[in-house]
Image (spheres, rainbow, N blue to C red):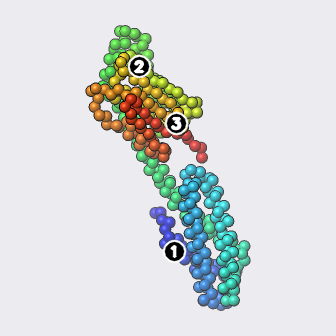
């Protein structure tokens, strides 16, 4: 069960800590109880209560501000260092104010007063405890969201792999490829053998990467080359792929089979012929984005697609990054921009 960090919870904790705090000092210092008046004890407990509540509220405000500027999930070590540093320094001004008020108001009530060093040590201890309590909600919430996102991403990856396999193994796809292989066996046996090898590589890539969330763009491009060989053979080279990428972009990561789904999407929705060849371009002109662009010539018999492939990619990226998949649909060109991801070492 998770305790919510609300004002009333902080108020209750400050009250519970304020009442016995002076009793704690009296016990450890063997100060006689009969020399402390009831009024002085109430005054002191109230003062400690206000000090603890102020410390709690400052920690709460500070952590909210830091969560916006430097969230735990972005850099855990640096955030922890900043939190500890503030938690250690924060008690100093609070103790000085508390001690000054103590001497101005309660000094003549027979009240035992520990040293400033003891007060600082005492308040610093609770400052660190308050820091942990206040930030526990942020850390637990991030952890809970990460688990939910991880589970959702795993489901999306399974769906993506199944969808890719279903696309490749669909009767229509197999029928087309078997017809192509049959025609090539009589016409060009070497090309037929190369086609079968390319087809097996496509299947192997999908199966080998079924459990991976991300893969390097360089590996994905190698797979797309094999896939494009099948498409070029199938459409008598009336389809072409142009790739212009920097070495830095090739080292970035993308979800497996994402490019294949986008290329397949272009093939499925456009006429491909001698008069209307399909040109697919892949470049990284936009910073941290990969652009997949193709000319548009809708099939005459083309029915409205379900958009399942594009929806799947959007959902997978939703669980991987805050950057969105961008779609620009024009009259002459269709363009999709997908974020290039990088794995950060903690």
Q: Position of residue 154 (x, y in %)?
A: 43, 43
Q: Which mark is residue 286?
A: 3
Query: Crowdedness of circle 2 by 10 Å Cα count: few (<14), some, many (20+)?
Result: some
Report helix, strand or loop for mark 3: loop
Label 1 – label 3 distance at C-alpha: 53 Å
Residue topped by disc 2: 232
Count of all numbered marks drawn on residues in the image:
3
Point 51% across, 57% down: residue:
140
Mark sitting earlier along the chain (2/1): 1
Does the image show residue 128?
yes
Point 44% across, 50% down: residue:
148
Q: Which mark is residue 226?
A: none
Point 54% across, 38% down: residue:
287
* Identity of the residue furthest to the front in this view: 331
Answer whether labels 2 and 1 touch (C-beta < 8 Å).
no
Label 3 – label 2 distance at C-alpha: 28 Å
251 vs 344: above or below: above
């Amino acid at each position: 069960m998770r305790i919510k960090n609300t004002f009333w919870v902080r108020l209750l904790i400050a009250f519970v800590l304020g009442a016995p705090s002076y009793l704690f000092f009296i016990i450890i210092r063997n100060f006689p109880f009969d020399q402390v008046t009831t009024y002085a004890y109430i005054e002191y407990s109230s003062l400690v209560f206000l000090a603890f509540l102020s410390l709690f509220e400052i920690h709460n405000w500070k952590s909210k501000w830091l969560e916006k500027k430097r969230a735990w999930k972005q850099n855990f070590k640096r955030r922890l260092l900043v939190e500890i540093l503030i938690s250690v320094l924060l008690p100093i001004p609070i103790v000085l104010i508390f001690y000054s008020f103590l001497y101005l108001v309660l000094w003549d009530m027979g009240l035992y007063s520990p040293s400033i060093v003891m007060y600082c040590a005492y308040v610093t201890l609770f400052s660190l405890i308050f820091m942990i309590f206040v930030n526990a909600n942020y850390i637990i919430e991030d952890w809970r969201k990460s688990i939910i996102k991880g589970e959702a991403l795993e489901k999306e990856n399974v769906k993506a792999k199944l969808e890719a396999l279903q696309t490749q193994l669909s009767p229509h796809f197999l029928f087309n490829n078997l017809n192509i292989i049959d025609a090539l066996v009589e016409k060009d046996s070497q090309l037929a053998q190369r086609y079968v090898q390319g087809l097996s590589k496509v299947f192997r890539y999908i199966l080998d990467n079924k459990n991976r969330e991300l893969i390097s763009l360089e590996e994905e491009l190698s797979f797309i080359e094999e896939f494009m060989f099948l498409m070029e053979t199938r459409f008598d080279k009336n389809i072409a792929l142009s790739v212009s990428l920097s070495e830095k972009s090739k080292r970035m990561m993308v979800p497996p089979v994402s490019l294949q789904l986008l290329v397949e999407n272009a093939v499925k929705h456009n006429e491909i012929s001698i008069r209307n060849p399909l040109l697919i371009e892949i470049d990284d002109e936009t910073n941290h984005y990969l652009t997949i662009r193709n000319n548009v010539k809708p099939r005459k018999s083309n029915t409205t697609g379900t958009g399942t492939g594009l929806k799947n990619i959007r959902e997978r990226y939703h669980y991987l990054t805050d950057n969105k998949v961008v779609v620009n649909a024009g009259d002459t060109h269709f363009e999709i921009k997908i974020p290039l991801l990088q794995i950060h070492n903690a």
